[in-house]
Image (tube, helix red, strand yellow):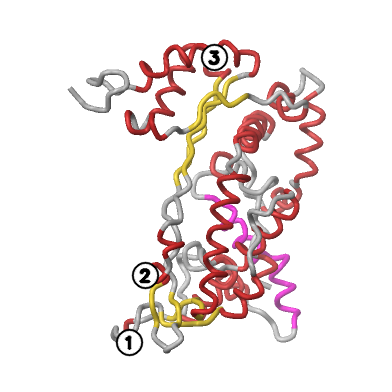
Amino acid sequence: MAALCHDIGHLPFSHAAEKELLPEDWDHERLTIEIIVGDELKQIWKEMEPPLNPEDIVKLAVGPGKAKDMSFSRWEEILSEIIAGDAFGVDRMDYLLRDSHHAGVAYGRFDHYRLVDTLRILPSSPSGEVEETIKPALGVEEGGIQSAEALMWARYLMYSQVYFHPVRRIYDIHLKDFLKEWLPDGKFSTDIDKHTAMTDAEVTTALLSAAFDNTKLGHKHARRLMRREHFKLLYRRNPSDIKINPESGKAIWKAAEEKFGADCVRYDSYSQKGGAPDFPVKMLDGRIESSLSISDALQRLPVVALNYVFVDRGKYDEAEKWLERNRETIIKQPGEEAGDGRTE
């Protein structure tokens, strides 16, 4: 039941508008919790044989990071990790394989059969540490390390090539802009009945209606989405620019807004918090080692980061020439000469 309900609190179009369009302190995990412990599902859990405790389902569905006011045993942590864990959660395995298939790309594929076969519950720390302080964790046998590497690289490639593709990202931005104007008070409701009644279908219908009727709320944003008139990519993160100014993308965004107007420019930024997760590996001789200590592939896994500046396609040609003429001046930090990373 926890696996089935793991993502039940998602908004229409999944993560696209969660941070900006829910009230403070709300996210899809909190909505998931409210649905699982709500009266409608509580009655279903009660009538099952044997009856299920909704709090137990919550623990395994969202894990200790989100169910912070609940006490977890070591084994409840393991069970929740199987569903929602960062390293080997079945949710991650599923979305990579599913999205890869439906997007028609090979990036997200990996040998999940081999990986599942070699998954083990292992001590979370290398051999030789005091056993009383060691928690159990999901890890792999040595023979499964290549499958685990493939999973982590599949995730990196899907993020860098699909999830963070600039056209996909600007569609998210236009969708958020539309929802801010179309939704009452610019936010999704946290009332469970209203939440479950609002699906992709209702939003898509509203987008279609608004895209072809300039009297409807969110018309210009819906038009950009439904008629493929989305903003075009003017600038993306560049290593040479980063050396001069780590905030080069933000500098170009601000300058572009000043030049072309805030309504004609959008900025998108993301930086992954960390690289590959560290998990235990059971070696052929029985010792437990850290995955990062034995895998060069995981040590070299890049961190995903992006800085995009988009501009209205009607302004694109002008903006492209403007940026070509002014980029060095815009990105240089105060006290620096253009093209020189040294501070005076």
Q: Amino acid at mark 3?
A: Ala
Span colored in magenta? 26-48
**Quadrant occupied by the N terminus:** bottom right
* Residue 49 visible in rendering: yes
> Is 42 in the magenta?
yes
Side of 25 relative to 115 (left or right): left
Name the foreground residue: 15 vs 96. Answer: 96
Identify residue for label 2.
293
> Is 164 in the magenta?
no
Q: Amino acid at mark 2?
A: Ser
Between the C-alphas of marks 2 and 3, the distance is: 47 Å
Identify residue for label 1.
132
Up/down of 158 relative to 322, above or below: below
Classed neighbour count for the residue bearing mark 3: other residues with Cα under 10 Å, few (<14), some (14–19), many (≥20):
some
Q: Which of the 4 quarters of the picture holds residue 178?
A: top right
- Which secondary structure type mostly characterizes the magenta part of the structure? helix
Marking on residue 222: none
Q: Secondary structure at mark 2?
A: helix
Q: Could you tell me residue 326's position as x and y percent?
A: 42, 13
Q: Could you tell me residue 31's position as x and y percent?
A: 61, 56
Q: Amino acid at mark 1?
A: Glu
Q: Could you tell me residue 114's position as x and y percent?
A: 63, 75
Identify residue for label 3.
319
Mark 2 or mark 1, which is nearer to you? 2
Mark 3 or mark 1, which is nearer to you? 3
Q: Residue at x 42, y 89 (%)?
A: 285
Side of 296 relative to 143 (left or right): left
Q: Secondary structure at mark 1?
A: helix
